[in-house]
Amino acid sequence: MTKAKEGITARPWGTYHKIFQEAGVWVKRVEVNPGQRLSLQKHGHRSEKWIIVSGQGMVTVNELTVTVAKGSIVDIPVHVIHRISNLGKKPLVFIEVACGDELTEKDIVRLEDDYAR
């Protein structure tokens, strides 16, 4: 895990900044660079809601793939396969609210990953 700026965590696809965390919930601001995407993944201990703030992208939730833009809300239950991709020329920004009994970055099961992690 590398730090881009204080409080901001860099990833190969972009950055995230954890805004808030307490028992059972965290809130992150996530920025996906143009042409990049997160791994196809699932979580064993948390559900997530994504609120798209700016940019445009494509989200896969299990077998469903939809385009998203500012104002879109994506619901990702526990154990559900998901991914988000930036289709635009500007950063795709969303707020992630995760809820669960065990909140950790180790709760990621990667099924496909462009960055060989």
Image (cartoon, rainbow, N blue to C red):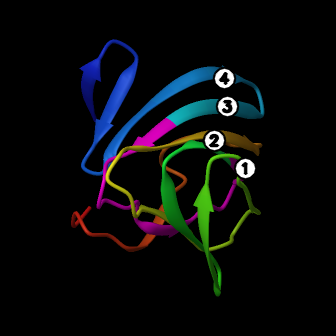
Looking at the image, which residue is at 76% across and 26% down?
Answer: 23
> Residue 109's spot in the image, x, y percent?
49, 66
**Is 60 drawn above or below residue 68 in the view shown?**
below
> Residue 73's spot in the image, x, y percent?
74, 53
Q: CA distance from mark 2 to mark 1?
A: 6 Å
Q: The residue under label 3 is which amino acid type?
A: Trp
Looking at the image, can residue 46 be seen? yes
Q: CA distance from mark 2 to mark 3?
A: 8 Å
Q: Residues within 10 Å of mark 1 (few under 14, many from 20)?
A: some
Number of numbered markers: 4
Q: CA distance from mark 4 to mark 2?
A: 12 Å
Q: Is residue 35 magenta?
A: yes
**Is 83 drawn above or below residue 4 in the view shown?**
below
Instruction: From the image, tell me which residue sits under label 3.
Output: 26
Magenta residues? 30-50
Q: Quadrant of the N terminus?
A: top left
Tell which tag, 2 or 3, sits nearer the viewer.
2
